[in-house]
Image (cartoon, rainbow, N blue to C red):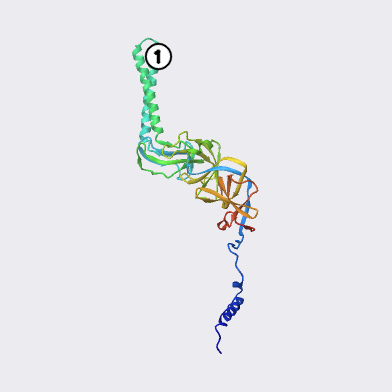
Amino acid sequence: MRLSLLTTPLLLSLLAACSGGDNPAASKAQPQGQKKAAPPVPVQVAAVEKQPLLRSLSAVGSLDSNESVTIAAEVAGRVSRIGFQEGQPVARGAVLIELDDALNRAELAQAQANLALAERNDRRAEEIAQRGLIAASERDSVAATLAVNRAAVQMAQAKLAKMRVLAPIAGVAGLRTVGVGDYVSPGQALVNLEAMNPMKLDFRLPESALPLLAPGQKLVAEVDAYPGEQFPGEVYAIDPRIADSSRSIAVRARLDNASGRLKPGLFARVRLATSAREDALVVPEQAVFPQGEQLFVYVIADGKAELRTVKVGQREPGRAEITEGLQQGEQVAIAGLQKLAPGAAVLLQAD
């Protein structure tokens, strides 16, 4: 059966209608310019709170003995006795080292004998002078001889005393460099003596910190030898001169060391308290993040995120002081910040 040319357009129209009915997407027109809304971003928040905050400065320094003396010989001689134990305390005035003093004792005995003779001659000259049987010049000569012999005795006693090396301070003896029988020369170092309670703590701060410094300020120091332990101290001296090379100022503090655990030369991390505030605005440290040269937080209000510039003051482990940009009671995001954008809808989550 042959179809006429007149029936062909009708068949094509019917086929098109049928194919359109089988495709629902084609039968419905899509609205133009509309996008599906983004889902809320899950975040955790914390409130801006007023808390006590101790303003402090951080620095590094080193510990030193309160007094440190290098004991040296003043005269030459041979060591005859060691009067201390290395690493043990010694009292002030204790005999540390004795040198062979046989020759010095002999010199003193000779000087004392000469003095005794001079004293007898002086007594005879005085008796004769009273009777007018001696010239005044001879009397003066006898008196001068007596004075010379007295000085000779004093000199011999002083030389003898220097054969015993005494501790000028109370402290702990270090490691000696000589032994019995060694010959020492004048000025030769024999042992160091350390007075270690209290300890000195020396550190430097930038010159900008000068208005914040004052004697009597409290600090804490930490040393690697005792991890996690803090040693309290107090500033007692501030160098009046700023260093020309580093533009920093030297500060010295005292640390109690009754236990004797702190040693000279230890490296220390210092936190110096400069002032205290009872009503500082603080947020968790993780709420603050940098962008370029500024610091920001996301404030959460009415279910949306607001990007806000802030200024940070004192930082402490786990929290940061906000000096500008926030008010007490506002909520800031502390988790999920990477997915946030200004104006984004948020879904609050529990910690």
- Residue 64 falls left or right of residue 334: left
Q: Closest to the observer: 205 or 264? A: 205
Which residue was labeled with disc 1?
127
Instruction: Tell me the quarter of the picture where residue 241 sits.
Output: top left
Q: Is residue 112 visible?
A: no
Q: Amino acid at mark 1?
A: Glu
Q: Secondary structure at mark 1?
A: helix
Q: In the rendered image, which quarter contains the C terminus?
A: bottom right
- Residue 138 falls left or right of residue 89: left
Q: Please state the horizontal and vertical placement of residue 232, each as a whole percent of the image.
A: 55, 43
Instruction: Tell me the quarter of the picture where residue 338 sits.
Output: bottom right
Residue neighbourhood size for the residue with mark 1, other residues' Cα within 10 Å, grouped as few (<14), some (14–19), many (≥20) = few
Q: Please state the horizontal and vertical placement of residue 6, each as a whole percent of the image.
A: 56, 82
Q: Please state the horizontal and vertical placement of residue 312, each as a whole percent of the image.
A: 56, 46
Specify the farthest residue to the bottom: 1
Residue at point 47%, 46% (across, down): 267
Q: Is residue 121 visible?
A: yes
Q: In the rendered image, which quarter contains the N terminus?
A: bottom right
Q: Please state the horizontal and vertical placement of residue 327, each as a whole percent of the image.
A: 63, 46
Specify the farthest residue to the top: 132
